[in-house]
Image (cartoon, rainbow, N blue to C red):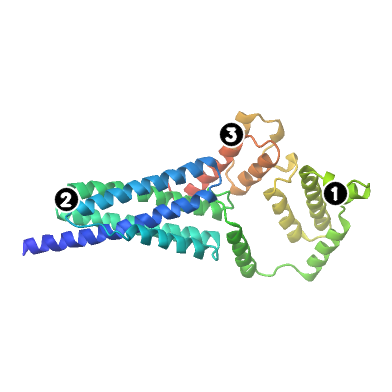
Amino acid sequence: MAQISIDTQRGTLVAQLRALLQLTNTEVQVAETRVVQARTDAVRRELEENAANGRTRSERIATAIRDLGSTPDVVAPLLGRLTAALKAVAEQAQPFDEALLGDLALEHQLLDRARYVKALATATNDTAVVSLADSLIDAHSATVDWLTTVLAEDALGGPAALRRTPIQAATGAAVRLINTPVTWSARSVDRAVDTAREVPTKVAELLGRGQRAGELTVDTLVASRDSALEAAEETTREGGAEGVADAIHKARAATGSLSADELPVDGYDELNVSAAVAAIKDLDAPADVRTVLAYEEQHKNRHSVVSAAQTRIAAIAKEVVGVE
């Protein structure tokens, strides 16, 4: 009876390793498709490394299956790639957070199966598979924490480590629009429309002086946008449309259009890199960090400062979701 029980456990172990192999191949393909969404070179390298590590895990799992006297499923890699490809297509119709939640679900399944494999291998005294399972548990635990942090960063307003695809951005905006209560009164809308009519942009002024449209630089267009937003906020606030004015202010903050004296860090423009980094580390509100980051990217774009802001947002996100 004991022999039959061990044989049964080994059969279950092989079946679970095959399931892990297919899921791991899916994970590899997902990591490769996420590379193009990396916000920074560091994240891109991390995703490329994750894909390479996944391929190594896949090879180790296949070896473990052979060592148990069985044969790896030759179609598992193909099924994994197909599953990931279908997932990538489906995600284009999903908001960004739903796509990441799908990735997180995959990692949780890999983690749970790795723990189950460890228990099965322990029962059959297979130390090699126990060691493999331990390494899988460590790898998937780290990825679960990383994806949880990325989701939290996105929930806090970002910037997250991964960028939305254009379709995901549009889908997310549509979902927010559907779920947002209509709080603007007709009077507020009228004020916003009047503001749009009243605010002259620098583009219009330059064209009025007879300059050719082709001479307008990107800087000019950005300056025109910033001036229009600032004037719109001022006009709507003076008219008593505080809700509209607050929305415009958030848009200005998100695009780096605020003036230096509107930033949550006093005298920010006079700070050198070290001082700016130190000031960012002292910020506790995600919105404040995002505001400084957007301003920095729009004006000085110092790599160390931008990196410090992104790291600070990640640290806040980890604290919020309890990831160490």
**Label 3: how many residues lie within 10 Å, few (<14), some (14-19) or many (20+)?**
few
Residue wearing tag 2: 126
**Label 1: how many residues lie within 10 Å, few (<14), some (14-19) or many (20+)?**
few
- In this view of the protein, can residue 238 be seen by the observer? yes
| Circle 3/circle 2 CB separation < 8 Å | no
- In this view of the protein, can residue 137 be seen by the observer? no
Q: Secondary structure at mark 2?
A: loop
Quadrant position of residue 49: top left
Residue wearing tag 3: 304
Cα–Cα gap, marks 3 and 2: 48 Å
Residue 250 is situated, as x and y percent measured from the top left of the image, at 69, 53
The three-letter amino acid code for the residue at tag 2 is: Asp
Q: Nearer the viewer, mark 3 or mark 2?
A: 2
Q: Nearer the viewer, mark 1 or mark 3?
A: 1
- The quadrant in which the N terminus is found is bottom left
Count of labels in the image: 3
Q: Nearer the viewer, mark 2 or mark 1?
A: 1
Q: First in sequence: mark 1 or mark 3? A: 1
Residue 11 is situated, as x and y percent measured from the top left of the image, at 18, 62
Residue 147 is situated, as x and y percent measured from the top left of the image, at 45, 52
Q: Residue furthest left?
A: 1
Residue wearing tag 1: 213
In this rendering, would 150 be left or right of 7? right
Cα–Cα gap, marks 1 and 3: 36 Å
Quadrant position of residue 273: top right
Who's the residue at 57% across and 44% down the image?
284
Decide: is 24 above or below 264: below
Residue 220 is situated, as x and y percent measured from the top left of the image, at 80, 44
Residue closer to the observer: 259 or 132: 132
Q: First in sequence: mark 2 or mark 1? A: 2
Q: Secondary structure at mark 3?
A: helix
